[in-house]
Image (cartoon, helix red, strand yellow):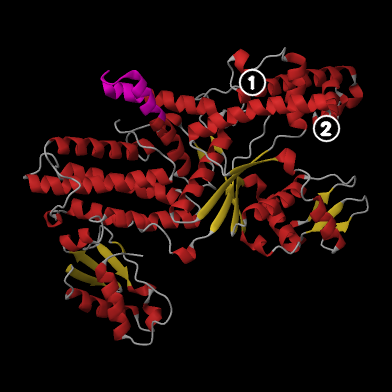
Amino acid sequence: MSNYKFIFDLEDHLKQQFPGKADTAWHIVPEKCPETMDGELTINAFRFARVFGQAPDKIAAAAAEFLQAHDDVEKVDTVKAFINITLKPAALYRDTVQDIDKLLADVLLPENERKRVLIEFSAPNTNKPQHLGHVRNNTIGQATASMLARVGHDVIPINLVNDRGIHICKSMLAYQRFGEGITPESSGIKGDHLVGNFYVKYANALSEQIKELRATRPDLADKDDDALFLETEIGAAAQEMLRKWEANDPEVRALWQKMNSWVLAGFDETYKRLGIEFEHTYLESKTYLLGKDLIADGLARGVFTKREDGATIADLGKMGKKVVLRSDGTSVYITQDIGTTVKKYSDYQPEEQIWVVGDEQNLHFQMLFAILKSLGFEWANNLSHLAYGMVNLPSGRMKSREGTVVDADDLCDEMANLAYAACKERDNNSTDDALLRERAEIIGLGALKFMLLKFNAKTTIMFDPNASIRFEGDTGPYVQYACARIASIGRKAAERGFNITGDVNWELLNSKEEKLLALDLSFYPNAVQQAAARRDASGLAEYLLNVAKSFNRFYRECPILAAENAELGQARARLAEQTRKVLVDGLATMTIKVPESM
């Protein structure tokens, strides 16, 4: 809701003009006036005329008549049911940027609208490093958690690591056969990459055995590779290792724990670099049996039925029939998800649960939510799947350890290196190299996150590292650069004796560029709240880009350090500093840092 005084006064006036008509909750929400119209803010009478049961143009006429006499208003113009308002400078700045702490605090929702929200994201496997898809998942998940927390929700970020199964045994078996006792410490290779190397070695060995099998067994020609898995020696060996793992074989379990610890330590390094944090990490090895008792209970109550082959199924109508227990009584993936969801609710009592998972799992989550509802869990109405599309790279732009998938660490390294090259070009060797590397890390990862977040999550995107790192255009570095430029201006202003934290004469800022910048800043609380409500950072990214552009227009047209007099320069420097605070807060809400200099 707006904090403009004239809006509150207008609401009270309309209630008096049309008594008894505004019993329901309603508010006038001003918008920025289109550049083609004469004014700074516009009010659309169509949006609340029905509250009073009056024609929109009649409401607009009554509003305009009141506002023409208002002390804060310089000019009013009506176009049909639109009321366009120009504010006096003192009133504009008083209700926008004069009290920047209040503006930033207005991001918070009323306490009765805040909720306890559990959000699960990342969900990597412990047989290989995280890849580009995980980077988008992690970025969306952490930014969504951050936005929800920024508006006041109690947010619980959760990870569920897939640390068991046949794919994990493949890496373990390859290590047994080809590892020769190598460790992350002895090799200098990050733990998740080391284990991933053995997953690749397993895949290569399996491919060779399948090739040999096809050459010696013509009768297998019609079978695909998956069907031949157990026909190979190495495939049967991996399956046997899985059987031993499930039987708690001491040797297999010891190897599993050792290799998993390497991978999890590697994941922690990647998470730390990307600024990813979790309240708790569940391990699939401890949750995969959850759900079986719930299925048994549901079967007894008629929620599920038995198929002829003995499998337990859920009839989900148009979605089809879903197996929830195999005929041999073993769990399937959705069995685990049913149990884990109930456990998460039991552990944290959230009012809402969100999963950040690729859109290829849309049907899975529709089925999961339907099953939980059929089991009688009322809170199952508050479950949601935040689906996201694929992210691709221009071919040949990035390295890949596995030859087909770009891993997260390579991507982060490449972004930091690109940013370092850009900083080095601008720096002219005036900055210590270690400091330049630190700055490049912030810029490179900020560019990566911003580019992934500026598109709606459902969009399949082409991520171009070189384009994302540019300091001009719709990029993260463009917004970061605006922050760094303002910080530099502030330092120079302080050297000249400007007091940018004290009182200033806001009435001096009467130019179009100055007033429009203040107006843009006033919409910050709404931008964050909308992004959080929609679970979509793209609107916030667009808002920050627009503010950065608005600042640059102001900076071009309204000299700060070279202002006509010190009082005017001080007021402009204060407006610039208020802009920096909003931009920094917005980027932080998107989990993006800002360097002091660029």
* Element carrying mark 1: helix
Q: How many marks?
A: 2
**Residue type at tag 1:** Leu
Q: Examine the image and state in which quarter residue 26 appears.
A: bottom left
- The numbered mark at residue 328 is none
User: Residue 514 at x, y = what percent?
Assistant: 19, 52
Question: Magenta residues, as a range?
Answer: 421-441
Name the residue: 74% across, 60% down. Answer: 318
Other-residue count near label 2 (Cα within 10 Å), few / some / many at <14 / 14–19 / ≥20: few
- Give the residue at mark 1: 194
Q: CA distance from mark 1 to mark 2?
A: 25 Å
Asked if one can make out residue 128 in the rendered structure from this viewpoint, the answer is no
Image position of 514 (left or right of 371): left
Name the residue: 27% across, 80% down. Answer: 13
Q: Residue furthest right?
A: 308
- Give the residue at mark 2: 248
- In front of the other: 54 or 249: 249
* Element carrying mark 2: loop
Q: Are marks 1 and 2 in contact (CB under 8 Å)?
A: no
User: Residue 426 at x, y = what percent?
Assistant: 28, 24
